[in-house]
Image: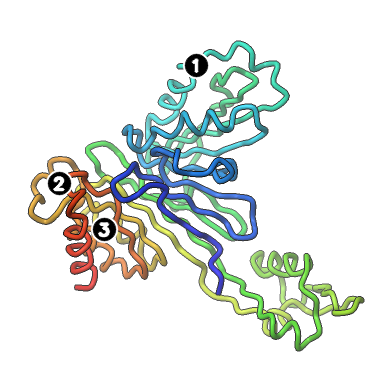
Amino acid sequence: MKPVFHPALVNDVFGDPAVYVDFLFEKRALLFDLGDLRNLATRKILKVRDIFVSHAHMDHFFGFDWLLRLCLGRDIRIRLFGPAGFLGQVEAKLAGYTWNLVENYDTDFTLDVTEILSETEARSARFRCQSGFRRENGYEWTIRDCVLLDEENLTVRFSLLDHKIPCLAFALQEKLHVNIRKNRLNEMKLEPGPWLQGFKHAVLAGLPGDTPIVARRQGGGEMTYCLDDLAGTIAHISTGQKIAYVTDAIYHEANAERIVRLATGADQFFIEAVFGDALTERAAQKYHLTARQAGSLARRAAVKFPVPFHFSPIYHDREYELREEFEQAFRG
């Protein structure tokens, strides 16, 4: 079964936090956090359409200017999400530059920015290149079930964590995974093609079982099937892929419960592991997790493949210590 989402750390475990998620079969990607993006190829950055920023400490937001530099002059619209105060922070970044000539641009690079005020409240506004990136179209809206994005086959949820300031954690969930059985297509003498996308959309939309699906036959011609009959023959439908992202949070039970609830069952779980167990007190003072705490949270959430990152540079020659502590806690 081919995964739809392909996530990877942009930097090594000591570098600025950022996870790039590429979408299979789509010219689209998203980012969790905006640390240093200079290790990411320009062609990859230009695929990004959604960015989820945990908080605006410099190592999580430094890449905004590089993103702006690469996207300026292009017809791209990007949605950004961040914690309370995020609208003002984006506005301040944009106000640091002079935009006296952009009204003449043929393109209108646009940022749709949302700040999460609480688990149920958000505020959004738009910043357009051709208007000099002035704040426009501000409005408030109600968040339901902590969902920020709800599309045909994906959702992005958040959880508010304590980092001495509000800090956001995120989970990307594929609603269903529809895997086409190529051997069954051959047995039915059906030709792969664009009609399969229509078939998948019908499955994901939950259309009635008697919905007609027109399939392309090998050698030419078409054949019409009922959706249920086709789905039971050529497709394997399963629970979708899940990716969770957690960084910059103190360990206490309220945070732990929120992290576990968000990440439960994740296929891949990116979680900070900043300090070793011997520096638990220092980790608490800095509102970060230790490797052991992170591993225990990954175990409690029953994730499949945890990815510890955001290691303190003091472990640069002792990376194995953090990995061993994490692994021991995860394996129990």
Q: Does label 3 or label 2 sit earlier along the sequence?
A: 3
Mark 2–mark 1 Cα distance, whole angstroms, equals: 37 Å
**At 24% from the left edge and 49% from the top edge, which residue is drawn?**
311
Indicate left or right for 304 with 91 as reference.
Answer: left
Disc 3 marks which residue?
A: 257
Indicate left or right for 219 with 273 as reference.
Answer: right
> Tag 1: residue type?
Tyr
Mark in the foreground, 2 or 1 = 1
> Tag 3: residue type?
Glu
The answer, for residue 46, to whether it is visible in the render is yes
Could you classify mark 1 by the number of other residues whose Cα lies within 10 Å: few (under 14), some (14-19), or many (20 or more)?
Answer: few
Could you classify mark 2 by the number of other residues whose Cα lies within 10 Å: few (under 14), some (14-19), or many (20 or more)?
Answer: many
Image quarter hosting the C terminus: bottom left
Q: Does label 3 or label 1 sit earlier along the sequence?
A: 1
Can you tell which mark lies on residue 283?
A: 2
**At 59% from the left edge and 17% from the top edge, which residue is drawn?**
132
Disc 1 marks which residue?
A: 97
* Circle 3 SS class: helix
* Circle 1 SS class: loop
Q: Does label 2 or label 1 sit earlier along the sequence?
A: 1
Mark 3–mark 1 Cα distance, whole angstroms, equals: 42 Å
Q: Examine the rendered structure and indicate whether residue 299 appears above or below residue 57.
A: below
